[in-house]
Image: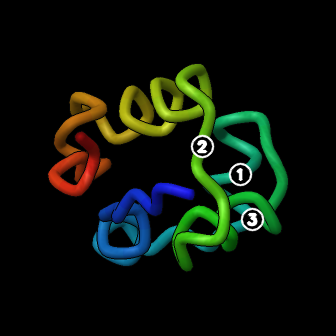
Amino acid sequence: MIKIKTRIRELRKERKLSQEELAMEVGTTRQTITSIEVEKYTASLVLSYKIAHFFDLTIEEVFDFSDVE
């Protein structure tokens, strides 16, 4: 299983958002946001897009694909 590192926690904290608040904004659950942040779950392409779009960033600016071949 490939683990993809993210900047979600860092971006959330910069904007003083809880996991619950971010989850509501992107249409998912707090548990999903938690799992993505601790690299236990890889977000779908659609969810990745929604998260990146919420932060006004590209997917590559939020998710680190350097370990993906």
Q: Name the residue under label 3.
A: 20
Residue 9 placement (x, y as % from top left) = 42, 73
The disc placed on residue 7 is: none
Q: What residue type is labelled 3?
A: Glu
Residue 49, position as x, y percentages in the image: 46, 24
Q: Distance between the residues labelled 2 and 1?
A: 12 Å
Q: Is 10 located above or below residue 6 in the figure?
A: below
**Within-10-Å neighbours for mark 3: few <14, some 14–19, many 20+:** some
Which residue is nearer to you in this view: 27 or 61? 61
Spatial distance from mark 3 to mark 2, Cα to Cα? 16 Å
Label 3 sits on a secondary structure element that is helix
Amino acid type, callout 1: Ala
Residue 20 found in image quarter? bottom right
User: Mark 2 belongs to which amino acid?
Assistant: Ala
The mark closer to the camera, 3 or 2, is 2
State which tag comes first along the sequence, 3 or 2: 3
Q: Position of residue 48 (x, y in %)?
A: 49, 34
Q: Are marks 3 and 1 in contact (CB under 8 Å)?
A: yes
* Labelled pair 3, 2 in contact (Cβ < 8 Å): no
SS class, disc 2 = loop
> How many dots with numbers?
3
Q: Mark 1 points at which residue?
A: 23
> In this rendering, would 68 be left or right of 27?
left
Residue at 28% x, 46% y: name it: 68
Closer-to-camera residue (2/46): 2
Q: Residues within 10 Å of mark 2 (few under 14, many from 20)?
A: some
User: Residue at horizontal 31%, vertical 64%?
Assistant: 7
Which residue is tagged 2? 43
Nearer to me, 35 or 18: 35
